[in-house]
Structures are given as C-alpha cells and as structure tokens.
C-alpha cells in the first residue's frame, strides 16, 4: 500500500513537472511568435509601403464607394469597365484594411475627427457594392458580407452618436453625417438580390428616419457657418441622400406610392442640380482627401433616375422621352466625376508614396 502511494506520488510529481515544462515551452513559443509578429509589423512600418499606408487617408473610402458604384452602374454597357472600376475599388478598400491592421492606433486617431469618422460609413457601403461583384459566384459569402456590412453600420452609428451627440455642437455637423446615418439604405437597394425585401424595408425606414433630421441641419450649417476649405468638397454629398432614398424605396416596396415617388424624385433631382451649380468653385480647390465626395453623389442620381423610369413604365405612367436622355447625361457626368476624382487621388497617392520614409515614423 505504501509502495502504491509512493508510486502515485512520483507519478503526480512527474506529471506536474511535465506540465510545467510543456507550459513553459508553450509560453516561450507564444512569446517568440508575438515578437515575430511585432517584428514583422515593425519591418513593414519602416518600409516605403508602410510609410505610404500610414499616410493613406481614411476618406479614401468615399472614392472606393464611388468606384464600386460606378462599376455596377456600367455593367449594362461594358464588362471591361465594370471589372476595372470594381477592381480599383477592391484594391483601395483592401489597402484601408491593411492600414487598420498595421497602423491601428493611427487609424483610430483619425476617427477622432467627425468628418473622417462619419465618412467611414462609406467603408461598409463599399462592402455592399463589392457584394454585387461576388454574389453571382459565391452567393452565401455575399450574403454573409451583406449581413456584416449591416452590423458594421449599426456599430458605427452607436459609436459615433455616443462620441459626438453627447457634446453636440453645430460646428461638428457636416454633410458626411447624412452618409453615416442614411448610408445603410444602400443595403435596402441590394436586399432583393438575397430575397430579403422585408428586411430591406426595415433597413430603408430606419435609415430614412435617422438621416432626415440631419439633412436640413447640415445644409443650414454650410449656409450659416463657414466650412473649412479642406472639407468644402463634402457639399456634393447633398446630392446623394434623397436619390439613395428614392432608389431604396423603389427597390424594396411592393407597391410604391406614386405621389411619394414623384416627391422624392423632385427633391432628389433638385439637390443634384444645386450641387452641379456648386461644382465650378469646388473644382477650383486644390486636392484634399475630401475629393472622395465627388464620386458616389454623382452616381446614385443616375441609378435612382433609371429606377424611376422603370417604375413609371411598369405603372403605365406617361413621361417625357427626354427623361431617358437625362439619365444618359447623368451617367456620363458620373463617369467623368468619378474618373476625375480617381486621377486626382492617384496623383496624390503617388506623391505620398514618393515621400517614403521622410514623413514616416514607426
């Protein structure tokens, strides 16, 4: 009996010793892996590409949104342009993800700015545009990304509201707030792809209720309170919300009300025309990252107008034939504006890449 107890004691001691050795080895391996990861990140941060990513502005997600939306708009005209603009959107969008991984602290620091934080909604809106590219090939993956974009939108709205509405000041209100609170209506536009019109209706009405109060407030702020020049291009965003609302309404409602459709169309096109009158002074400005606002707000009016004409045709409502020409003109303007913003952005990105390590600190 004593021998048995002695043997058990030896076994226990050996087991504890083996466990300690195993745990020690695991800890050392984990530490080495962590050190390799940190070392790897530090190595990337010190390269020219690392410095480039550090200076990549968060508002570039406005450009990625415009590129993805333009590609989808051009699908009916050119498969090449469809994939070209979609590819460019995916590449720049991916760069933003890599920046978040490598420069997370700097990334989050940028989001302390209300313009950068609110326009970051375009990141999830870009995801929604890219969903349309992959859905024909990977339906379930596309549906998962659609859900993820909706969740990301909810988190972003909660975080932004907690940060900026508790100490509200008119000077922090910009048209980008309409992107944040109403941008997810784009998920409603896409919802029929997944036979999720009912969910799309809820998304649409929630987005409409959230953005409508901020639209007149942001417009009034630009009129009454001077806006810093680097933010002035965001005035173009005023052309987007009601057009997105019109496109969303026509996408998810089984029986759209004609009077509401026409009301939204009049408001949407009126704001679009207003923004067009402001373009000459905006295009005279030097380049700013806010140039991303010169993209999607010029694509969505053409998309909404095309949906409007399809609805009127289906309802048997007569409309002037010139409206078809208006849609074509708006599509041409969209191509010109997005391509122009892309060129200006590429020139800017080339400059920050060439600066390399001179403006980069690990």
Image: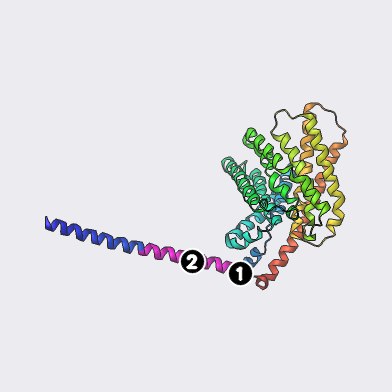
Q: Picture coordinates of residue 117 (x, y %)?
A: 67, 54
Residue 283 vs residue 48, the one in the foreground = 283
Give the mark nearest the N terminus, 1 or 2. 2
Circle 1 residues within 10 Å: few <14, some 14–19, many ≥20: some
Which color scheme did the rendering employ for the protein?
A: rainbow
Q: Residue at x 28, y 63 (%)?
A: 17
* Disc sitting over residue 155 in the figure: none
> Compared with residue 175, is residue 11 higher up or lower down, i.e. above or below?
below
Tell which residue pokes out farthest to the bottom in this image.
358
Residue 222 placement, left or right of 129: right
Residue 361 seen anywhere in this rendered image of the structure:
yes
Q: Picture coordinates of residue 157 (x, y %)?
A: 64, 48
What secondary structure prevails in the magenta region? helix
Q: Is residue 65 magenta?
A: no
Q: Residue at x 66, y 65 (%)?
A: 52
Residue 42 placement, left or right of 185: left
Q: Picture coordinates of residue 64 (x, y %)?
A: 70, 52
Which residues make up the magenta segment?
Answer: 24-46
- Image-quadrant location for residue 94: bottom right
- In the rendered image, which residue does mark 1 sit on? 47
Q: Quadrant of the C terminus?
A: bottom right
Q: Secondary structure at mark 2?
A: helix
Q: Is residue 41 magenta?
A: yes
* Disc sitting over residue 36 in the figure: 2
Q: Picture coordinates of residue 32 (x, y %)?
A: 44, 66
Q: Residue at x 53, y 66 (%)?
A: 40
Inter-mark Cα distance, 1 to 2: 17 Å
């Amino acid at each position: 009996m004593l021998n048995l107890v002695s043997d058990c004691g030896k076994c226990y001691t050996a087991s504890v010793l083996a466990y300690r050795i195993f745990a020690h080895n695991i800890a050392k391996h984990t530490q080495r892996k962590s050190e390799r990861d940190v070392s790897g990140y530090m190595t990337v941060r010190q390269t020219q590409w690392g410095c480039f990513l550090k200076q990549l502005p968060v508002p570039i997600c406005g450009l990625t949104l415009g590129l993805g939306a333009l590609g989808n708009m051009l699908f009916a005209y050119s498969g090449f342009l469809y994939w070209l603009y979609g590819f460019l959107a995916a590449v720049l969008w991916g760069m933003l993800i890599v920046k978040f991984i490598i420069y997370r602290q700097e990334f989050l620091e940028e989001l302390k700015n209300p313009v950068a934080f609110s326009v970051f909604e375009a990141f999830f809106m870009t995801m929604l545009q890219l969903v349309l590219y992959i859905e024909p090939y990977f339906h379930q993956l596309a549906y998962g990304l659609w859900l993820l974009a909706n969740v990301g939108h909810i988190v972003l709205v909660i975080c932004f509201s907690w940060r900026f509405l508790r100490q509200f000041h008119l000077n922090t209100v910009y048209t980008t707030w309409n992107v944040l609170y109403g941008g997810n209506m784009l998920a409603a536009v896409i919802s029929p792809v997944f036979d999720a019109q009912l969910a799309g209706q809820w998304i649409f009405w929630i987005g409409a209720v959230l953005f409508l109060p901020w639209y007149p407030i942001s417009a009034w702020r630009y009129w009454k309170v001077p806006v810093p020049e680097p933010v002035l291009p965001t005035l173009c965003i005023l052309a987007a919300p009601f057009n997105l609302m019109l496109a969303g309404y026509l996408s998810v409602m089984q029986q759209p009300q004609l009077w509401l459709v026409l009301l939204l169309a009049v408001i949407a096109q009126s704001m679009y025309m207003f923004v067009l009158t402001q373009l000459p002074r905006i295009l005279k400005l030097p380049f700013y990252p806010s140039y991303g606002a010169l993209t999607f707000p010029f694509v969505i009016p053409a998309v909404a107008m095309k949906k409007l004409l399809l609805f009127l045709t289906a309802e048997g409502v007569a409309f002037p034939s010139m409206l078809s020409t208006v849609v074509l003109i708006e599509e041409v303007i969209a191509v010109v504006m997005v391509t122009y913003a892309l060129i200006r952005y590429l020139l800017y990105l080339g400059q920050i890449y060439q600066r390399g390590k001179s403006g980069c600190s690990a």
